[in-house]
Amino acid sequence: MQGRKDMKRLKVLFRQGWLGQQHGGVMVEFAIILPVLLLLVFGVIDFGHALYMKAEITAASREGARYAVKYHTDNNGTPVKPCNLTGPTVEEFVINAYASLLPSDAELKLNPPPTGSGYTSGNPGEDVIISVQATKNWWVIGALTGMSPLTLQSTTVMKCE
């Protein structure tokens, strides 16, 4: 019997006293959920930026290869080999066109330098290989998880015209 009386008293206390109050409960739940929500949102932004950078790197390698393989001539009309291009070289063309589209710490570069038999000979039908590389430094995810920077690379092979 004593147990039932104690239960009744506890129920009365719960309804009337401080045990039944729920003021601030929503704030506590929000404070618990907020860090997880922010991590998800900033994680999506960080990975979306990595995908954007990968798309720009791919476009840079494609445009660099296109610039190298198209038919160039000097002032006398003599064909110029891709390795002998001046103003701008293939590397200068890629960096000038795409460095401003990426973060300043991306370190955009051609790595390895342009290669392929067509790059040195300029003969139609021979390959020119352009590889572009950049570094993705994580904004939020890296700071929280200690992820190391991601190296993004894209390679394009085209035939000389």
Image (spheres, grey):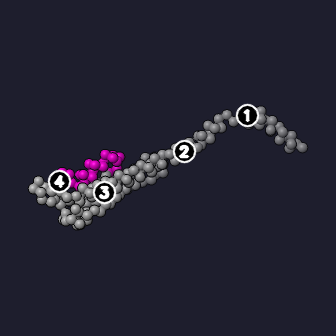
Q: Does 100 sit above or below residue 80?
A: above
- The label number, if any, that marks residue 62 in the structure image: 3
The residue identified by callout 1 is: 18
Mark 3 residue type: Arg
Q: Quadrant of residue 119?
A: bottom left
Task: Evaluate if marks 4 and 3 touch, with contact meaning CB atoms under 8 Å apart.
Answer: no
**Residue 93 relative to residue 106: left or right:** left
- Split into 4 quadrants, where in the image is the N terminus? top right
Per the image, label 4 sits on a secondary structure element best described as: loop
For marks 1 and 3 on the same chain, the one whose residue lies earlier in the sequence: 1
Residue 48 belongs to magenta span: no
Question: Residue 98: x, y in percent?
Answer: 30, 49
The residue identified by callout 4 is: 86
Q: Relative to the observer, which residue lies in front, 22 or 114? A: 114
- The label number, if any, that marks residue 37 in the structure image: 2
Residue in the image at 23% along x and 63% along y: 160
